[in-house]
């Protein structure tokens, strides 16, 4: 009986490890491919790349739900699609575009570190705009995040103000999306696949015209001047396909790990992305810059742990609002974007 109990536990551990590894693999590959597209292929059109990702994800979500039957379709009223889904899709679109814009101008290591500032922007927005109050432990956990970001920014050898601002505003967009999801999508228990199914087509519609107007001429010129057009197009389309696969991998890892494991794995994933990007692109990283990145990731891990403890305490109180909030947070956790954004699992 004891061996029988160990076997399922070992199987569960193996499943969690494999889920995390494939999540890391898809995430790091998408980030590296996007940076490769901008830097090595000289395809400097972040709006177009984002649009390709949205189109691939729209098609992928349709196939996953209607053909493969991987997830049942969550029905949404036509009125709610415009009143609830469309505003979310707009913020979602801005979030992804700004992420790609920042990747166009700054190294992967710097961009990933700035994205770790999202917990701080989420808490500050909820405090300033929605007048929500937080325990002192939450505020204390933000100190190393803010300090690490400041140290990383000051010591970044490849600093670009436009890329930095795009990444910071992207953090605000991510926080806004997370906060709005709780009110706009109340009553709908979306998973990551259904999220993409409804939001990606809206995002494509929002972005298509600006991409054509702002980047259309440049893209046409690139087609005529680039040497290996076929292989370059394969890489660009491949990044779009992998961006959708990333959503599938996130869905898998959410249901295969605990909250603490997900939080730690999410921060280690940033470290893996930074290391792999440095090995490929060899962007200069100073010792103080690496220390700042490390402090930021430790702060994010501590923040996630504090949120987890508070959520457990609230959920332990029968009939308390915390119980409903904890359940809602798990559904919100599956509201994941096409290109990775570290989410909270509480």
Image (cartoon, rainbow, N blue to C red):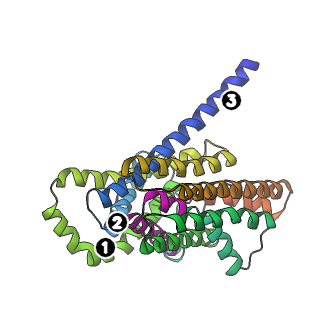
Q: CA distance from mark 3 to mark 2?
A: 42 Å
Mark seen at residue 45:
none
The quarter of the displayed image where residue 157 is located: bottom left
Q: For residue 103: magenta?
A: yes
Circle 3 sits on which residue? 9
Horizontal and vertical percent position of residue 301? 67, 53
Residue at the image point whose x is 62% and y is 62% from the top: 148
Horizontal and vertical percent position of residue 327? 71, 57
Q: Is residue 14 above or below residue 182?
A: above
Q: Is residue 182 above or below residue 254?
A: below
Q: CA distance from mark 1 to mark 2?
A: 8 Å
Query: Is residue 248 at all visible to an observer of this figure?
Result: no
Query: Is residue 160 at all visible to an observer of this figure?
Result: yes
Circle 1 sits on which residue? 211
- Range of magenta residues: 86-114
Circle 2 sits on which residue? 51
Q: In the structure shown, which secondary structural element does the residue marked by tag 2 occupy? A: helix
Residue at the image point whose x is 64% and y is 48% from the top: 264
Q: In the structure shown, which secondary structural element does the residue marked by tag 1 occupy? A: helix
């Amino acid at each position: 009986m004891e061996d029988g109990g160990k076997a399922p536990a070992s199987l569960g551990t193996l499943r969690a490890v494999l889920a995390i590894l494939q999540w890391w693999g898809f995430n790091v590959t998408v980030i590296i491919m996007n940076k490769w597209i901008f830097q090595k292929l000289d395809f400097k059109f972040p709006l177009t790349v984002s649009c390709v990702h949205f189109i691939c994800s729209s098609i992928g979500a349709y196939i996953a739900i209607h053909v493969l039957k991987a997830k049942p379709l969550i029905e949404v009223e036509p009125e709610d699609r415009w009143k609830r889904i469309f505003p979310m899709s707009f913020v979602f679109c801005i979030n992804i575009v700004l992420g790609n814009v920042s990747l166009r101008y700054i190294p992967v290591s710097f961009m990933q570190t700035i994205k770790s500032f999202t917990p701080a922007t989420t808490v500050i927005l909820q405090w300033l705009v929605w007048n929500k109050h937080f325990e002192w432990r939450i505020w204390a956990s933000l100190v190393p995040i803010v300090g690490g970001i400041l140290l990383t920014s000051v010591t970044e050898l490849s600093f670009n103000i436009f890329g930095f601002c795009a990444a910071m505003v992207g953090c605000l967009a991510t926080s806004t999306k997370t906060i709005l999801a709780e009110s706009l999508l109340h009553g709908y228990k979306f998973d990551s696949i259904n999220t993409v199914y409804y939001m990606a087509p809206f995002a494509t519609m929002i972005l298509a015209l600006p991409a054509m107007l702002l980047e259309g001429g440049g893209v046409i010129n690139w087609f005529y001047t680039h040497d290996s057009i076929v292989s370059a197009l394969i890489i660009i389309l491949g990044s779009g396909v992998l961006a959708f696969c990333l959503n599938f991998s996130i869905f898998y890892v959410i249901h295969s790990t605990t909250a603490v494991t997900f939080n730690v794995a999410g921060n280690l994933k940033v470290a893996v992305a930074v290391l792999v990007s440095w090995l490929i692109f060899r962007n200069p990283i100073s010792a103080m810059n690496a220390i700042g990145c490390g402090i930021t990731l430790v702060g994010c891990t501590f923040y996630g742990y504090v949120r987890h403890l508070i959520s457990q305490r609230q959920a332990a109180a029968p009939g308390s609002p915390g119980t409903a909030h904890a359940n809602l947070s798990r559904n919100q956790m599956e509201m994941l974007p096409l290109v990775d954004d570290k989410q909270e699992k509480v």
